[in-house]
Image (cartoon, rainbow, N blue to C red):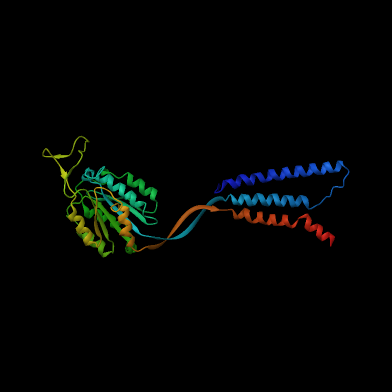
Amino acid sequence: MRFANPIFLVLSLLVPVAGLWWSFLKARREKALSKLTLKVPTSSVSGLQTACIVTGLFLALFAAARPQWGKSMEKTMTRARNVVIAIDVSRSMLAEDVRPNRLERAKADVADLIDSLAGDRCALVAFRRTGVVVCPLTTDHGYLRSALERMSPESAPRGETDLGSAIRAALSALDPAADDHNAIILISDGGDLRGEALKNAEAARKRGIPIFTVGIGDPKRGATIPAEDGRGVQKFDGKPVMVKLEESALKAIAEASKGAYVPLATAGTAETTLGAIYRRRLRQIALMEQNEEESRLGERYQIFLVPGLVLLLVGAALSKGRFAKRKAE
């Protein structure tokens, strides 16, 4: 058993104590009057009336504490969109042309986007050579944030970035029955269109799912990548490997899916965060009505409230004044 308002439980426990104290004072008063040889009025109703009032008040306060036990399923109607966020976790995303690096900037902006979700459902996909669903569609933002924080280059199989695989994994996370309410956000520093990137983007368009591609990094100046052993930078033929934001593939995917390409500025502003992008663009996607079942502890206050109110009414009906009036009549 759990109490939603435990302060009333404390108050209810004071009621019997107050009743006993009042009975003690009443008995002492009657005893003092009897010693003065005064006639002490007696009433067969008085004891019953006191018991009804004390018990009724105790039950009413106990009910106000909202005792809860057992489980009940409640159905609620919600209106929501479904959004899959696919994040490139390849090693090029560790380049530091965006502070602290591309991947961490992307994760920080996705965290900002989560704050804008309201009741919308969201899933996370990590991708390198293949896409991996690291968090299915959910409205549990705490779980979503936890999955986001754990994302790293080890969240997906090693290999060259495959944008097509990322789109395929994102599509698989969405229910085809709700495609009018679905969208994909793909965050990457780019790549080529080999494989099935455009084919999968066109498949998304046919399902009515726009892909909003987000380019992160500097498209003009290259940036180095930290070496896998953490010492210095990654090299090829003795020269540092330089990576730039490659926008062409991201633009082509957005165009093929009837989405939009959004370059994420290297210096964050209120208008270039993913939260702002979401509010400005994805809010136009239709809302879907859906039933959700939620398990929670059952409210049991009615069991105590109804008899408590009845006893208080009985106690009021047994008042001495009312019976005295009837006797006089």
Q: Residue at x 86, y 43 (%)?
A: 34
Percent position of residue 106, x then y: 28, 48
Q: Nearer the viewer, residue 21 or 289?
A: 21
Q: In the current view of this chain or complex, which residue is farthest to the left?
A: 237
- Which quadrant would the C terminus be assigned to in this image? bottom right
Point 78% across, 51% down: residue: 46
Q: Which residue lies furthest to the top in this view?
A: 231
Front one among 99 and 260: 99
Give residue 20's quadrant in the image: top right
Residue 97: x and y in percent read 21, 44
Asked if residue 297 lies left or right of residue 175, the reply is: right
Which residue is found at the position 17% from the left and 39% from the top? Answer: 234
Q: Disc count in the image?
A: 0
The image position of residue 32, as x and y in percent, is: 83, 41
**270 and 276: which is toward the camera:** 270
Give the percent coordinates (x, y) of residue 176: 32, 62
Please identify the quarter of the rendering in which residue 171 is found.
bottom left
Horizontally, is 284 left or right of 35 in the view?
A: left
The residue most toward the right is 37
